[in-house]
Amino acid sequence: MHIVVKKLQLTDAEKALFEEPQFIHKKSLKIKKEDGSTIELPAFRVQFNNARGPFKGGIRFHPLADEDEVKALAALMAIKTAVVNIPFGGGKGGVQCNPKELTKAEVQKVARAYIRAFQDHIGPDIDCPAPDVNTTPAIMAWMRDEYEKQTKSYSPAVITGKPLAFGGSLGRDTATARGGFFILQEMMDREALDPEELTVAIQGFGNAGAHMAHYLHNAGYTVVAVSDSQGGVYSPEGIDPVRIQKYKGKTGSVAGEYCEGSVCDIGRMKMDNVQHITNEEILELPCDILIPAALDNVITADNAKNIKAKYILELANGPTTPEADAIFETMNVRVIPDVLANAGGVTVSYFEWTQGRSGEQWTKEQVDSELKRVILEGYKAVRREARREKVSYRHAAFSVGIKRMLEAMKVRGWL
């Protein structure tokens, strides 16, 4: 963001609005565990900018969710909502804890304590949280329920990412992958490339990565590799995501059809022309399109020159470092940045918020049609900016977002 702010030659007053969040709220949550002991967990809600609408952003439960991380993520959310031109600002929340070390009842206590701590700073017209790392639709349901108890209100629009039975939206579970798929299809059409002649590698087989694999496979792309936290599988002839998902469900690993832990059936893998690969190796495989859909900072100056893909679609948040970006520009690798590529999730969150406020329930077809319209308008705006200014898609996306935020600030009289 700082590079783009500098290049746009903003005034000192304009720059100041992008240097720090509008509000940083910090609390300590006291949780009584089932064994009778009490723990205190640092919690944050950072509200970066609301010039374009209520603050919007997820809440993560993670040991590394400190103030600096949440601040950075809040800024990216402000850009992301502006890039796809939905009427939200940017915010983010976090609780420093490892939910895997807590019981279900204790996680519910953390969720409800978070809402009690920050209830004065959230609301359907103020700040609308959503799920993020280690938070689920069930946790969002507990949060909405706690907010309504504390405020004695009916507020289906206060939280998004809820279960369908409690005010959620159809299509929310597939939204991140679906939005990325629409962008990739549009780009390939414009480049006059045939999906049946293109190969794809996907790092990460969670919600976004698995759904993307299915969409691409069904559209004719050849998915040659997928991986999860335990490694992955690669076949130059292509793999079937349905089969991979079936064995992952049974064994807990995408390589589960061939491997148990680190022990693999080499003979069977040779017969099927399949190799077991690491998460590092998948990034450097021969393929046309690489989709990092797992962790941040996996593509760095150390491995960027070894990446053979000509297109990178960032379904994960922050998978590419600035140093790697600079290398890709010299290699003519097209990177579709996270603030555009994975904005399908927040876009359908906006649809959920709209449904919550109106009392309507959209069909899956309505959600899909509107998601495609919104996400492709965002893509076209970024593409135009990139071509006009002769910059990367990441630079163009940040430029589009900052300009839209500035326009809203000027209308409000902040500048």
Image (cartoon, grey):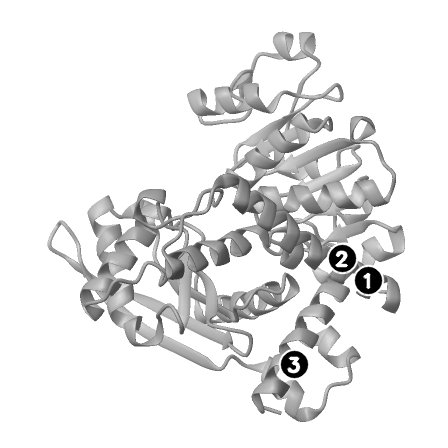
Instruction: Using the rendered image of the protein, determine whether residue 294 is visible from the camera's viewpoint.
Output: no
CB-based contact (under 8 Å), mark 2 and mark 3? no
Few, some or many C-alpha atoms within 10 Å of disc 3 (few <14, some 14-19, many ≥20)? some
Residue occupying image coordinates x 47% and y 63%? 57
Residue 146: image location, x then y, percent: 23, 61
Q: CA distance from mark 3 to mark 1?
A: 19 Å
Quarter of the picture containing the C terminus is bottom right
Amino acid at pointer 3: Leu
Q: Secondary structure at mark 1?
A: helix
- Checking the image for residue 384, the label placed there is 1
Would residue 56 be found to the left or right of residue 197 on screen?
left
CB-based contact (under 8 Å), mark 2 and mark 1? yes
Residue 411: image location, x then y, percent: 61, 86
Q: CA distance from mark 2 to mark 3?
A: 20 Å
Few, some or many C-alpha atoms within 10 Å of disc 2 (few <14, some 14-19, many ≥20)? some
Residue occupying image coordinates x 76% and y 52%? 335
Viewer-proximal residue among 80 and 353: 353
Viewer-proximal residue among 285 and 91: 91
